[in-house]
Amino acid sequence: MTRTAVYLEMGTRRVFACAADWPGWCRLGRTEEEALETLAAYLPRYAPVAELARVPVPSDAFDVVERLGGKAAYTDYGVPAAVADGDGRPTRDEEAARQGALLEAVWARFDQVVRASPAELRKGPRGGGRDRDKMVDHVLGAEAGYGRKYGVKFKQPAVDDRTAIEAARAAQLDVLARPSDGTPPVPRGWPIRYAIRRIAWHALDHAWEMEDRSTTR
């Protein structure tokens, strides 16, 4: 099986390990080794995304292809915010379709988890954490904000408005699943590869949190 290309985003206190070509498969650790171990441990949870996209499940044997300096206000607080050098690579027709399919699969997996989760989620160790619908609202709101980084403007859908949610996703895919020369679609925006990875990471991170905090687990 082909080894998985991974980049490391290095903060002062935390490190992200992210699979460069597998949107959403990105985990955090206190060291490089811990981040890579956690990434590997999450492969069984990422596998349903690959299966929904109808692509082979990736390998948990890694090749570290880049080390990036993180951003203090993001990386150390659990948000992968560094754009990799590899994100400037052109995306041809087949790869653009694959990346779009994986993003659609992330959204489908997120929806599956939402449907399976109770409205009230178990609180975190300090009594915090959003309940299900507030978490969904947060993810939808973040995506409405992200859209400005790749030239897609849409109003944040309500959590129970499936028509609006599907329309917002379709509008994003119309841009994100196109071939790209690697430059951001808008000035000071995000390259397509990074945009897909950021959207997918955020949705899956909250899907997995929802699973972990479900009172039915």
Image: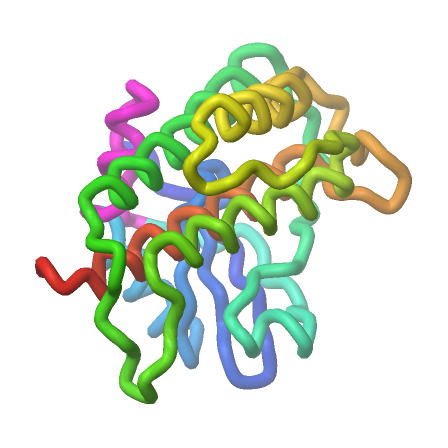
In the picture, which quadrant includes the N terminus? top left
* Residue furthest to the top: 93
Q: Residue at left 29%, top 55%?
A: 208
Q: How many marks?
A: 0
In the picture, which quadrant includes the C terminus? bottom left
Q: Residue at left 30%, top 64%?
A: 38
Q: Nearer the viewer, residue 95 or 5?
A: 95
Left/right placement of residue 56 relative to residue 99 reads left
In this view, 177 is above or below 14 = above
Q: Nearer the viewer, residue 49 or 69?
A: 49
Left/right placement of residue 89 relative to residue 45 reads right
Residue 132, given in percent of the width and then of the height, sits at 33, 56
Q: Which residues are magenta?
A: 44-61
Q: Nearer the viewer, residue 151 or 88?
A: 151
Q: Residue at left 48%, top 37%?
A: 21
Q: Residue at left 23%, top 35%?
A: 48
